[in-house]
Amino acid sequence: MNEISVVGAGLAGCEVAWQLARFNLDVNLYEMKPKNFSKAHKSENFAELVCSNSFKSTKEGSAPLMLKKEMQLLNSLTLEVAEKEKVDAGDALAVDRERFSKELTKRILANEKINVIRKEIKEIPDGLVIFATGPLTSESLTKCILKKIGKEELYFFDAIAPIVYGNSINYEKAFFASRNDISSKDYLNCPMNKEEYLNFYENLINAKTANLHSFDKPKVFQGCMPIEIMAKRGQDTMRFGPLKPVGIVNPKTNEKYYSIVQLRKENLESSFFNIVGFQTNLTYSEQKRVFRLIPALENAEFLRYGTMHKNIFINSPSVLEKDLSLKEDGRIFFAGQITGVEGYLESAACGIAVGKILGERLKNNKEFKFPETSLIGSLMRYITNEENASNFQPMNANFGILPSLDEPIKGKKERHIKLSKRGVLDLEEALK
């Protein structure tokens, strides 16, 4: 049997290797860290969470929960470790990012079927190859891949939210509560009255941003829109987005507010907090000045400032087969965000899919197909549908990409629950 190489030990790459190992297949997992780091990566560990520390909603009838259920059916390493290292985040699954990455790395290194090689890959290896190098693929490998597929890269700019030290927050001007649940301590809420909000808004829309490369047109992915771009869409846009005050009440005073900035725990010790929804491209000095206008953050110290970086992805509909193999060379596969799926869960799920397909093919001589009614199946269909090639954009898991129900259901929540149950049951049946 040909040697199997997985390039990139992010969420997708680790899931591919983990799935193949479950089929008792030997895998070489290549990771360029710690010899080389991308502009956004800092840790030597695998599956480093660069942006948020959240794996999104756990609410019934939500697309993220449906995707989680599908991934659990396929023994997802990501979700297994996430459950072990989770922190309080209300109706979302969030993790202590350092502990998560460290634990996942530990499990990969302990797997006897996975041979980890710390080396930057600059050429396409021999044998079976799965590129799971993510949106921050190194420049040399990007050139190699583009030469192979004969297509130009696509890209968008992704933004990261800042993280502040917990001991620098003014807790007298903040309170713990979750939306519609004042007894919960999942989020630390930093309220503003109308005057404070308008002052913050005016300073934000006039703040200086960091320069992007002049040869790149700043295409921004909607799911990670910088807070300053959102603010420029209208005075109240943020108040209908990440600063929405609806459903949040101060448990001590029963007071409601004009706007609220929420902070989410970054670790179990609550020593670091992520400013939710505050992805930004402001200069560091402007972040410090403007974000300190939020009363509870008036003395905030930053563990990490927000940044913006270029994410690349290939035009999958024009170059990939339905099983995510390269049309021009069937021994080469792609998995994760480099294919155009967007998000932690989606990237991991894409890795699981490739690992499952290859494992069944190589070990059991069986062609496994994900049901199109499943979110994994629909994501794969989206990124390989040739009709999407002319205007291909990254895609999150959502109910809009699923086939319609046979019987129309009026209520949105009821319809989503029905779609979710159908897809999960269909995947269960396919896995028998």
Image (cartoon, helix red, strand yellow):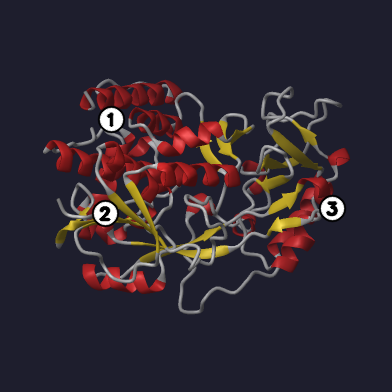
Residue on which disc 1 sits: 404
Relative to 106, 5 lies left or right: left
Image point 43% across, 64% down: which residue? 32
Quick check: 99 above or below 139?
A: above
| Secondary element type, mark 3 | loop
Q: Amino acid at mark 3?
A: Glu
The residue wearing badge 2 is 388
Name the quarter where the C terminus is drawn.
top left
Of the numbered discs in the image, which one, if any, rests on residue 311? none
Left or right, 39 with reference to 346:
right
Marks 1,2: beta carbons within 8 A: no
* Mark nearer the viewer, 2 or 3: 3
Q: In the image, is residue 158 above or below residue 56?
A: below
Q: How many marks?
A: 3
Q: Residues within 10 Å of mark 2 (few under 14, many from 20)?
A: some
Report, in whole angstroms, how far the alpha carbon at label 2 lies from the one at label 3: 47 Å
Q: Secondary structure at mark 1?
A: loop
Name the residue carrying label 3.
298
| Mark closer to the observer (3, 1) | 3
| Residue 264 visible, this angle | yes
- Disc 1 packing (10 Å; few <14; some 14–19; many ≥20): few
Which sits earlier in the primary sequence, circle 1 or circle 2? 2
Quadrant of residue 242 within the rendered picture: top right
Q: Amino acid at mark 2?
A: Asn
Q: Is residue 150 visible?
A: no
Mark 2 or mark 3: name the one nearer the start of the chain: 3
* Measured Cα–Cα span from mark 1 to mark 2: 19 Å
**Label 2: element kind:** helix
